[in-house]
Image (cartoon, rainbow, N blue to C red):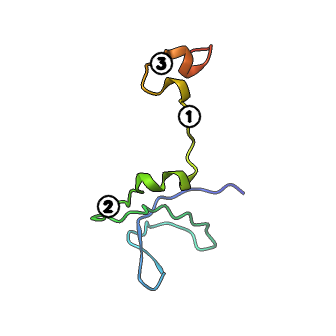
Amino acid sequence: MALQAVKLKGRIGPDGRLEILDWPAGLPEGEVEVIVLYSPVQPGEQAARPSPLAWPALNLPAHDLGRFLGESLRRKELYNDDGR
């Protein structure tokens, strides 16, 4: 059986219950699957930016610039032989 999608707006209350704000007419009764998309930063808040001192603990991908530190690089040195 194929599923159909409907985009709904809702709100999660302090008790953790999901409230649908705009319920479209014509939805059949029965079980549904729900995917909740949310922003980790609420409107009016600012995302916490990690201090540069914490960057090593984040295990971010890094390049060893070694001998190039303080000099300029050619495209081939950055992107290998294929230029990408």
Q: Secondary structure at mark 1?
A: loop
Secondary element at image label 2: loop
Q: Disc 2 and disc 3: Cα gap in Å?
A: 35 Å
Q: Nearer the viewer, residue 38 or 72?
A: 72
Crowd tier of the residue under label 3, counting other residues whose Cα lies within 10 Å: few below 14, some 14–19, many 20 or above: few
Which residue is disc 1 drawn over? Answer: 63
- Residue that lies at the very extreme toward the bottom in this rendered image: 15
- Residue 9: percent from left, percent from top: 41, 65
Label 1 sits on what residue type? His
Tell me residue 49's x, y (percent). 39, 56
Tell me the quarter of the picture where residue 1 sits. bottom right
Nearest the eye: 84 or 40: 84
* Relative image position of residue 17 (x, y in whole percent): 48, 81
Q: Give me the residue at 62% from left, 73% from top.
A: 30
Per the image, the residue denoted by label 2 is: 46
Q: Residue at x 53, y 30 (%)?
A: 65
Residue 84 visible in rendering: no
Q: In terms of secondary structure, where does tag 3 sit?
A: loop
Q: Nearer the viewer, residue 83 or 55?
A: 55
37 and 49: which is toward the camera: 49
Relative horizontal placement of residue 55, taking residue 46 as reference (left or right): right
**Disc nearest the viewer among 2 and 3:** 3
Q: Earlier in the sequence, mark 1 or mark 2?
A: 2
Number of numbered discs: 3
Q: Can residue 52 be seen by looking at this rendering?
A: yes
Q: Is residue 69 above or below residue 5?
A: above
Give the amino acid at mark 3: Leu
Instruction: Kindly identify which numbered label has been placed on residue 73.
Output: 3
Kindly report the distance in space between the C-alpha atoms of the residues bearing marks 3 and 1.
Answer: 13 Å
